[in-house]
């Protein structure tokens, strides 16, 4: 998990995910879209994803103070 700060100062959390074949992309995309629509106080909002040849990422809201339990 990495913290990314955009030019406008917005902080995001970026998670690298494991290697997967291209055939799994549609399944992955559908699952991310379903999860992104969920709203619950114990879930961090999914902002997007990137599926490239060498890199697969999920982008979340950044939660400061180190622990979701807090």
Image (cartoon, rainbow, N blue to C red):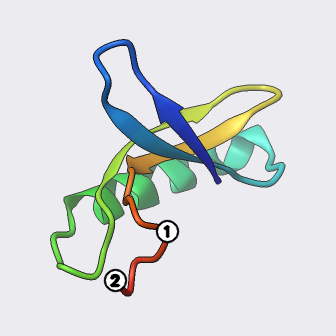
Residue 68 percent coordinates (x, y): 40, 78
- Residue 70's label in the rendered image is 2
How far across and how far down the image is residue 57, in percent? 61, 41
- Looking at the image, residue 65 lies above or below residue 15: below
Q: Nearer the viewer, residue 64 or 29?
A: 64
The local crowd at label 1, few if under 14, some if 14 to 19, many if 20 or more residues have their Cα within 10 Å, is few
Disc 2 is placed on an element classified as: loop
Label 1 sits on residue: 66
Q: In the rendered view, does 18 fall on the left or right side of 48? A: right
Q: At 52% across and 33% down in the image, what residue appears?
A: 4
Q: Is residue 6 above or below residue 58?
A: above
| Residue 65, horizontal then vertical, whole percent | 41, 66
Task: Give yes or no for contact between labels 1 and 2 (Cβ–Cβ under 8 Å).
Answer: yes
Q: How many marks do you count on the picture? A: 2
Q: In which quadrant will I find the N terminus?
A: bottom right
Give the farthest residue toward the top.
7
Q: Is residue 5 left or right of residue 42?
A: right
Q: CA distance from mark 1 to mark 2?
A: 8 Å
Left or right, 27 with reference to 16: left
Quarter of the view holding residue 6: top left
Question: Could you tell whether 62 is left or right of 37 in the image?
Answer: right
Residue 47 % position (x, y): 33, 43
Residue farthest along the front direction in this orientation: 65
Where on the picture, by quarter, is residue 9? top left
Q: Measuring 68% from the left and 39% from the top, which residue is drawn there?
A: 56
Indicate the quadrant containing the C terminus: top left, top right, bottom left or bottom right: bottom left
Instruction: Return the residue found at the far bottom.
Output: 69
Secondary structure of residue under mark 1: loop
């Amino acid at each position: 998990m990495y913290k990314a700060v955009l030019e406008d100062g917005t902080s995001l959390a970026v998670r690298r995910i494991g290697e997967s074949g291209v055939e799994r992309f549609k399944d992955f995309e559908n699952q991310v879209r379903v999860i992104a629509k969920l709203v619950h106080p114990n879930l961090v909002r999914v902002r997007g994803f990137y599926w490239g040849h060498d890199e697969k990422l999920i982008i979340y809201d950044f939660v400061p103070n180190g622990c979701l339990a807090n």
